[in-house]
């Protein structure tokens, strides 16, 4: 169940004060998941990397737990080593497929908790993953993601 569903009558500001900001203080970021709704697959994103001067990270089409694992793993990498470049392909790592970094042109259209924290002036990068056959969402043969893997920005490569 979501925080808002578990806390009827509370506001978005309450959510920031009681949930979001404490997690960011404790870990440096938090992962916000958005459940699938109708034809729109689930997605997840970080909130808090902006405080460190980094872009927020986004992933689409994965189940909640897997999204959280992927975003937490790569958020640690970003904080430790610096942000990936748009268009960069991150090689497959243990437990993760190769990822291509795609910038979001209008992250405020999708990352509503980040909008509550930062207004509309923040950056975000989507971590787009290949399927088990090495195909990407822009390939006709792509068969990955739960309900597909929408790419929310304009691809730099290709």
Image: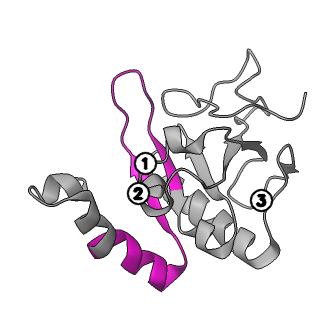
Q: Which residue is mark 2?
A: 116
| Circle nearer the viewer, 2 or 3 | 2
Q: Residue at x 73, y 37 (%)?
A: 130
| Circle nearer the viewer, 3 or 1 | 1
Q: Which residue is mark 1?
A: 112
| Circle nearer the viewer, 2 or 1 | 2
Q: Residue at x 62, y 31 (%)?
A: 144
Placement of 23 over or under 148, stated as above or below: below
Asked if residue 43 lies in the magenta stretch, the reply is yes
Disc 2 and disc 1: Cα gap in Å?
A: 6 Å
Q: Contact (CB < 8 A) between labels 2 and 1?
A: yes
Q: Which mark is residue 55?
A: none
Magenta residues, start to end: 18-45
Point out the tag, 2 or 3, that comes first from the N-terminus.
3
Q: Is residue 64 left or right of residue 15?
A: right
Q: Is residue 65 visible?
A: no
Q: Which residue is mark 3?
A: 93
Residue 73 % position (x, y): 64, 67
Q: So how many labels did they put on this image?
A: 3
Depth check: give the residue in front, 84 or 133: 84
At mark 2, the secondary structure is helix
The picture quadrant where one finds residue 34 is top left
């Amino acid at each position: 169940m979501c925080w808002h569903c578990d806390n009827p009558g509370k506001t978005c500001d309450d959510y920031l004060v009681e949930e979001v900001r404490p997690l960011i203080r404790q870990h440096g970021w938090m992962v916000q998941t958005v459940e699938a709704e109708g034809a729109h697959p689930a997605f997840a994103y970080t909130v808090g990397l902006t405080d460190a001067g980094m872009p927020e990270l986004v992933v689409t089409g994965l189940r909640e737990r897997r999204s959280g694992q992927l975003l937490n793993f790569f958020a640690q990498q970003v904080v430790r080593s610096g942000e990936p470049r748009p268009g960069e392909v991150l090689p497959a790592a243990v437990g993760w497929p190769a990822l291509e970094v795609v910038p979001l042109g209008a992250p405020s259209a999708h990352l509503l908790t980040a909008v509550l924290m930062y207004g509309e002036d923040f950056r975000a990068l989507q971590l787009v993953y290949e399927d088990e056959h090495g195909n990407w969402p822009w390939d006709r043969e792509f068969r990955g993601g739960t309900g597909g893997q929408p790419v929310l920005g304009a691809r730099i490569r290709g």
